[in-house]
Image (spheres, rainbow, N blue to C red):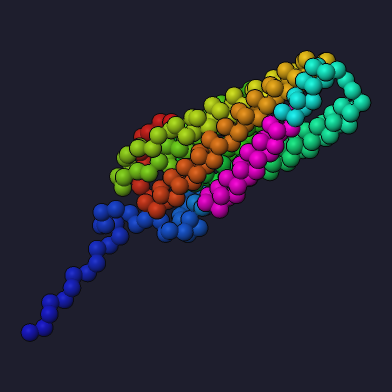
Amino acid sequence: MSAAPLPPAPPPHAQSHPQPYPQSFGYAPTGPAGAVLSSPVGIGKAVVALLGAVIVADLLSVAAGFNIRQVLNDVLDHGYTTGDESRAARADDFYAATGVFQLLALFATAVLFLIWFRRTRLNAEVFDPSVQPMRPGWAIGGWFVPVAGLWLPRRIAGGIWTVSDRANVDGSGRAASTAPMNLWWGAWICALLFSQYASRRYDRAEGADELVRAAGQLMISDALDIVAAVLAIVFVRKLTRMQTERAALGPLPYAEFPPR
């Protein structure tokens, strides 16, 4: 007796869930305005590495500031001697060198961070463009708007975070805490504003007493920058992982969730 023939496979529209994106971001379908999923993993790792360089530069700057304070305190306690001139010059050269290192590390990190941030925003355009509060171009332009640049990038990040949060196959589910994003943004704003204040105080300082206080404030600024860099690493790694997991789920129904 011959076996009964197998029933034909159901057509694609009869499947219960859409097929997931391939594991490689590069083969995902395009979204509105030609947006294409692109993996943020590689650029995210580069950003994390450069944030580590920023932390090292800030630590060296703290050490240089401590060195300058010691020199100035010795002058205040014991008076100015001949040997203090060369010691002060070395301390000043060390502080200047750490400042150059800081600027280079910050510039390189900012460039790669913007590239990573824009990539995650374009991925969000594929996941669900309806949740995004602003057009993709603002992922870069928003940082350079005077005054408004203090909150526009956080608004954009909230939309990215919402659609990148790992969801169920029906599009529901928002389990990921926004703490990494909020802590990073708050620390970055505090570090930015205090850095501008401390730099102005140091530039206007006159006399050893004022220089000692101003150098201490710059050390606090560097410490805040270290905290912001550490939290930025947490934010970048978390969002990169969320987008990788979200892409693996495939196309899902759009959900009515406001940006977080």
Residue 161 visible in rendering? yes
Give percent across and percent down for residue 136. Answer: 55, 40
Which residue reaches farthest right? 82
**Which quadrant: the C terminus?**
top left
Residue at point 25% right, 57% down? 14
The question of residue 57 being in magenta is answered with yes
Which residue reaches farthest bottom? 1
Left or right: residue 218 versus residue 1 is right
**Would you place residue 214 above or below residue 117 in this image?**
above
Give percent across and percent down for residue 30. Answer: 48, 52
Residue 30 or 73: which is nearer the viewer? 73
Give percent across and percent down for residue 256. Answer: 36, 34
Q: Which residues are magenta?
A: 40-65
Residue 188 or 154: which is nearer the viewer? 188
Number of numbered callouts drawn: 0
Residue at point 50% right, 58% down? 26
**Would you place residue 174 above or below residue 40 in this image?**
above
